[in-house]
Amino acid sequence: MDNKEIEIKAKDIRKDIIEQLYLAKSGHPGGSLSIADILAVLYFDEINIDVKNPKWENRDRVILSKGHTVPALYAVLCEKGFFEKEELKKLRKLNGILQGHPNMNETPGIDMSSGSLGQGLSIANGMAISAKMDNKDYRVYCILGDGEIEEGQNWEAAMASNKYKLDNLCVIVDNNNLQIDGTIEEVMSSYPIDEKFKSFGFNVICIDGHNIDEIKQAFKEARNAKGRPTCIIAKTIKGKGVPFMENKVEWHGKAPNEEEYNEAIKFF
C-alpha cells in the first residue's frame, strides 16, 4: 500500500478511536491516537496475517503491551476486516467483543491479552523463541509505552531478547513523552531510551512515529538485522490528530463529552 493510502487509513483509525471512546464514555484517547500511524503501516504494509484464519500458526504476531490504547488496535483490525464496524460501537460493553484491554479469547485478530504493563516483552520473547525452536519464519512485534518501560520486568526481558538472539523480534516504543501523571521526566525518566536498548544489545532505530516513510524503512531495517533484536523508538505526539488533545496529559485516560466529540470529529 502506498504512503497516501496508509495516511488515509491512519486518519480513519483516529476517527474510529474518537467515536469508540465517545460512545463508551471511557477509555484512553491520547496514547491510542499516537500509535495510529504505526499500526496503519504495521497492518497494511508490514505483517503477514490471514483475516480469514486469525489463528493461522504461521502468522506474524502483534502484542500491544500498552493494552489501554487498544481502541487504536480495534480500529485497525476492523479496517482489516476481522469484525464488523458495528462492533466498535460496543467498546467496553458487556454485549460486545471489544473490552477495555485486549482479550485474545474474545476478539479475532488479538494475539495476546495484555494491559498489565511491563509484561508484553516477556511474552513476545516467548513467541519469538517458539518460532525459532519450531523453525518458523513468523515475526513478533511488541508495542511498548515510554511510561511502561519504567517497569523493571522490561529490562529483564530485554536481556533475554539479546541472549537468545531474537532477530525475529521487533520492539516499538511509543515515545509520546507523557504518561498518566505527567511527562516521562517528571514521573520516572527512562531517558535516554535509545542508549538503554543499545546497551542491552538491541539494534536501535529512532524515527518520527508519524512519518509513514520512516516507519516503513524502520520495519525494513528491522527485517534485515540479523543475530539481534530490533527496537524502534518512535517519537510521537500524544493525542495526535486532534489539536486540543495533542501533548495534553489530561487526555491520557478520559473520553470526550458531546461538545468535545463534536469538535474532535471535525478534524476527520
Image (cartoon, helix red, strand yellow):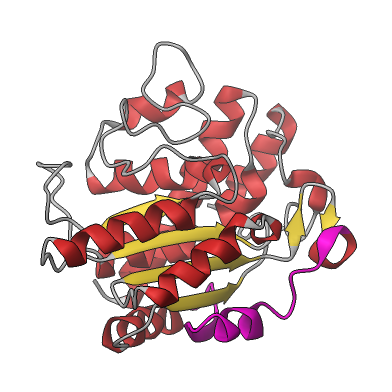
Q: Which residues are magenta?
A: 187-211
Residue 267 visible in rendering? no
Measuring from the top left, give residue 136's x and y in whole percent. Answer: 12, 64
Magenta residue check for 86: no
Q: Quadrant of residue 219?
A: bottom left
Q: How many marks?
A: 0
Left or right: where 25 falls relative to 171: right
Foreground residue, 113 or 86? Answer: 113
Q: Is residue 59 above or below residue 173?
A: above
Give me the residue at 31% from left, 84% from top: 220
Residue at x-position 25% and y-position 33%: 83
Q: Residue at x 10, y 41 (%)?
A: 52
The answer to whether residue 210 is magenta is yes
Q: Position of residue 189 (x, y in %)?
A: 80, 68
Which residue sits furthest front? 163
* Residue 164 or residue 213, whichever sits in front: 164
| Residue 77, x across and y down, in percent | 32, 45
Above or below for 258 versus 245: above
Q: Is residue 52 visible?
A: yes
Q: Residue at x 44, y 36 (%)?
A: 102
In-front residue for pair 8/42:
42
Q: Position of residue 85 (x, y in %)?
A: 32, 32
Q: Is residue 267 left or right of residue 129?
A: right
Quadrant of the rendering where the N terminus is positioned: bottom left
